[in-house]
Every structure is written in C-alpha cells, then in structure tokens.
Image (tube, rainbow, N blue to C red):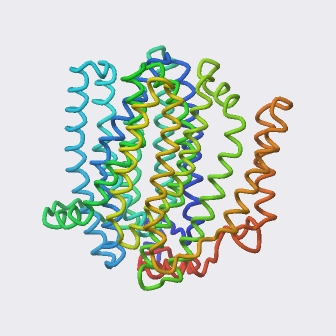
Amino acid sequence: MAADDTAPKTPRVSGSVLSGAGVLIAGRYVVAGLATVSTFIIIHHLSRAQFGDYGVVFSVLAIVGFIADLKLSRIVLSDVLEADDEAATRIVGSYTGLRLVIGVVSYAIAMACVGIGAMAGSFSTQVAWGVAIGGLNLVILSAAYGLILLFDARLWFRDVALSNVLGQVASVTLIVAVTAAGIGTLLWYVGAFVVNGVVILGWLAFTLRRGAGLKIVFDPSEWWVWIREAAPLALGAALDTIYFRIDIIMLSIMVSSTAAGIYNVGYKFSDLFGAIAFAVATPALTLLVAAWPSDPGAFRRTFRHTLVILAVAAVGACAGFLVYAEPIITTVAGQRYAVGAASARLLVVGQAIHFFTMLAFTTLVASRRNRLYPVAMLVGVVVNVGLNLMLIPEYSYLGSGWATVVTELLVLGVLGVGVMRIPGLRPLPLLALAKTFGAGGAAAAVGLALFGRVPWPVGGAAVGIVYLGLVHVLSPNGPGGLLAFRGDPHDDLAAAIDLGIDRPDLGTGLPD
C-alpha cells in the first residue's frame, strides 16, 4: 500500500468538451496574459519596421511549419483510440519519431526559403537570422506535439495547459531580463520563443512518466501509411496556413516593414481570440472521432454543443473589440499603432469566422471526409493572394484586412457544404445562433452608447456583462442559461468510456 501511495499519479482526465476546453482555455489565457506582457515590451522596444520584421519571421515559420504538422495527428488519433494502452503508447512513440524527422526536414526547408529570399532582397538579414533561431522550434515543438497526441487521446488536458503556461513563464522571464539589461533585440525576442518550446517539451516528457512509458520508435512502413492517408489534410494545411499568413509577408514586400508592423498588431489580437477555437476544438475532435460512425446521436450532440460554444465566444469577442479596438490598441501598443485599428477589427472578424471553419474542418476529419479540405483551402489561397495583389497597392494593411474577411467567408462556405452532407447533422441550431447574434448586437449597442463617455475598460466590462446576461436569459444552448454550456455530462462521459477511459467520477483517472 505504501508503494501505491508514493507512486506517481496519472494525469487528470477531462470528462467533457467544456471541461476539457475549460482547462485549455484557462491555460491559454494565462499564457495569453503573459504573452500580452511580452508583446507590450516588444512593441514598445522595437521600431515599427523591426516589429514588422518580427511578424515576418513568424509568418515564414508558420507557413513552413505546416510541414512539421501535416495534420497527421487527426489520422493517428483514430489508431490510438482503437488500441489498448500498450499499443497506443507504441503508436504515439512511432508518431513522435516521425514528427522529429519531419521537423528536421522542415527546418532545412525554412532555411532554404529564407536564404533565397534574402539573396533576392525580399528579406532582411535580421529576418534570415530570426528564422534560423526561431526555426529550431520546428524540431522542438514537433516532438512536443507528438507527445501531446497521447494526452489528447486520454483527455489529459490539464498537463497540456500547464506545459504551455510554464513555457510562457520562461519566455516572458527572458524577455523581461534582456530588455531590463538593455540588450533586447529582435533576435533575443525570437530566442525567447525557442525557450518556450524547450520548456513545453521538457514538462510533457516529465509528465508522461506518470501516465505511460513512451519510447521513440522509427518505423517508416507505418509512417508511410499515415502520410498517405493524411495527404489531403497535409495539402489543405499548407494552403490554409498560406492564405492565413501570406498577407503580412506581401505587405512587407509590396509596401514596407512598417506597414507589416502596424498590421502585425492586429494579428496579435486575432491570435489571442483564436486560442478559444483551438481549445474548444481539441476535446471536440476526440469525442467526435469516438462517436463516428457508431453513435450518430452523440456525434450530432457534440457537433451542436461545440457550434454553440464557438458562436457565443466569437460573437462576444467581436462585440467588444469592434467597438473599443482603437483605445485598446493605443493602450497596449501605443498611439503610433492606432492607425491600424480598422485592419485589426477586420482581422478579428476574420478570426471569428475562422472559428466555424475550424469546427467544419474538425467535423469533416472526424467523419473521414478529408478530400474537401484541400479544395476549400486552394480557394482560400487563390482568392486571398489575388485580393491582396489588388488591394495592397492602394489600401495597404486595410486592404489585407478586407481580403482576409472575404477569404474566410468563401472558405467557410465551401467547407460548410461538406459538413451539411454528413448524415444526421441537420438541422442546424439556427434559433440558438440567432439568439447569440442578437445578444451580441445588443451588447455592442451598449458599448457604442458608452464610447467616449466612460473609460474604455469600463465600457468593455459593460459590454461583457450585458452580453453574458443576455446569453443567460436567452439560453441559446437550452434551459439553464450559461449553466447549459456544461452540456450533458452523461453524453460526454459515455464517449469517454468508448475511448477506453474510466469515468472521472470513479476517481482513478487511469487508462483502461
């Protein structure tokens, strides 16, 4: 008994979409708070042109980074869920080995791309060195995301969130230290990003000793099966990242690094809101995969529940930011970035639309409908690049913002057609969506009425209170108002049991 008492405990299981998403969102917003501190320091320490180069570095890494992902996790997750604990651990070890190899290859490609761009005069030397340093995370985080697959499959979301928090603490500590020492530069700030990745990987590896023994496996024959099945997703992921990130690179080349820097501030707020969609979609994917195709009722309930959660989050974010974008940007980034408020609004609207794009993608992948994804993303790339080529010369970053919104609407439309063809998903909860948008419109009207009359934090808080109050009264997710967003725990726990995970209320939290 004493040995059992002193043995490491397994990571804690999250038993539902909202509990899993809640843990991830909480972690993401602790990270976001720390990242806001980092961003505040970086924005005020670098010139607008240097901040533009900083944004270009991470846009290049994001575009090349699709290679280090290839959306393989969506495919391998099914194999992990169907396997017993020992086999699942071996599969994740093999997947991690593949991610490491792909990470090394993606780093080489990033260096080749930035080298060619520097020789052509498209990228500055600082951008080239920034990619060389920041690109190390293509390898480091590839390994980390390999390990995270086991955490996702077992619904161990708490430790995933904690790893991100610890990584961000290390990152912001370095940023504060080098800035206080007077040696803060673009390259130091990019290096802090790498420190973040190292800490994340270290914590995940340390935590796995409590839940499972895992060894990295190199099995090319198994890798080929996954890569072949994931090919449509990989192509779609590449095109998705290109259309979502190419605009800041185009701005830097076609206008100036300063224009890219102004636009990049809007991206910081867009990414902040985007963390919600990722946090909600992660547990939803696990539960959707578990329900398909054997339990169409659970599949539809998870889809509907996730859709309404994302709608409430997207509308709420827009209701506040569209009204108070300029004072928020001025407070965080300074008056010199206030000219980018309009483009920041557009980027946030684009991100809100992307919430539903992510749900559509997650639903299609869970139901093994992978072919439509690259088609939709190809539409996105063609439209986005074309619109940017037309709009940037005359409208600069504002034109890029409009290109983003139009592109997101078209991509969502294409993916939405595929989702609506999945048996059992219709009808959509249109009344719930109407209630949500109505609450958002009313809250935004309150914000406009208070704009200029009270300090923006007070007005923003009023928007949030009114919005959540109306959501509670209108109850878009059913009786109970805001409490209804917890969902039916029995539904989610039934899906969790299908994954081979004990019910959390049994108190073990051990994989079956």
Q: Nearer the viewer, residue 352 or 227?
A: 352
Q: Position of residue 496 (x, y in %)?
A: 49, 77
Q: Residue at x 49, y 44 (%)?
A: 166
Looking at the rendering, which quadrant does residue 414 occupy?
Answer: bottom left
The part of the image, by quadrant, that contains residue 71 is bottom left
Q: Residue 426 location, x and y as percent? A: 55, 76
Count the labels in the image: 0
Residue 42 spot, x, y in % from top left: 51, 24
The residue at the point 68 percent across, 51 percent down is 316
Q: Relative to 276, is 118 above or below?
A: above
Residue at the outermost top position:
182
Residue 366 placement (x, y as % from top left): 40, 70
Q: Is residue 430 above or below residue 311?
A: below
Query: With respect to residue 470, does 509 lie above or below?
Result: below
Please give left or right for residue 93 compared with residue 421 in the image: left
Quadrant including the C terminus: bottom left
